[in-house]
Image: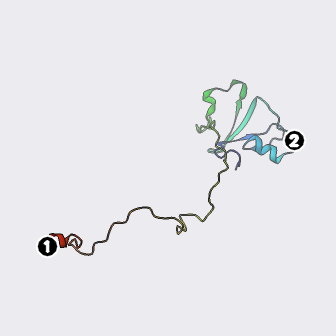
Amino acid sequence: MCKHILNAQVSIRSPCCRKWFDCAECHREQESHPLAQRTEMVFACKKCKKAFRKDGAEFEESDEYCPHCDNHFVLEAVTPKPILKFEGEDARVDNRMLKDERIRGKEQRSIFDVEEAPNKLG
């Protein structure tokens, strides 16, 4: 699982060490040598788990899909973004910190409207 690209659809086989990585940054973190760049790339689809080759020099729009399962693997990368927020418990488990902003209606115990009764009797 790649921590740099959250929606990685394929793994890429490195031509220098012949190991599988989700992105070039994962290769840089795990290996001591630089990533060798070639025009032909070997991918493994994460949906159907099958490997296939693509030529980077002749990359077309139809090459953005897995040839086995038609999974669209060329997507805009979703990377983790640093955010500043209040860290608390999961609100679905413990919701004591949340304030209910909805207006609660008045409960009526009777079929008669007690507040309007003095105005109607007379």
Question: Quick one: which residue is furthest to the left in this view?
Answer: 122
The residue at 72%/25% (across/down) is 57
Q: Residues within 10 Å of mark 1 (few under 14, many from 20)?
A: few
Pinpoint residue 69: horizontal percent, then vertical percent. 59, 39
Residue 60 image-quadrant placement: top right
Q: CA distance from mark 1 to mark 2?
A: 92 Å
Pinpoint residue 101: horizontal percent, then vertical percent. 44, 61
Secondary-structure class at tag 1: loop
Tag 1: amino acid: Leu
Q: Which residue is under mark 1? A: 121
Residue 15 image-quadrant placement: top right
- The relative height of residue 20 versus residue 112 in the rendered view (above or below) is above
Q: In the image, which is nearer the foreground, mark 1 or mark 2? A: 1
Pinpoint residue 90: horizontal percent, then vertical percent. 58, 64
The residue at 63%/36% (across/down) is 74
Q: Which residue is under mark 2? A: 33
Residue 112 image-quadrant placement: bottom left
Tag 2: amino acid: His
Q: In the rendered image, which quarter contains the C terminus? A: bottom left
37 horizontally vs 47: left or right: right
47 horizontally vs 4: left or right: left
Pinpoint residue 19: horizontal percent, then vertical percent. 79, 44
Q: Nearer the viewer, residue 83 or 14?
A: 83
Secondary-structure class at tag 2: loop
Question: Quick one: which residue is furthest to the bottom in this view?
Answer: 109
55 horizontally vs 107: left or right: right
First reached walking from the N terminus: tag 1 or tag 2:
2
Question: Quick one: which residue is furthest to the right in this view?
Answer: 32
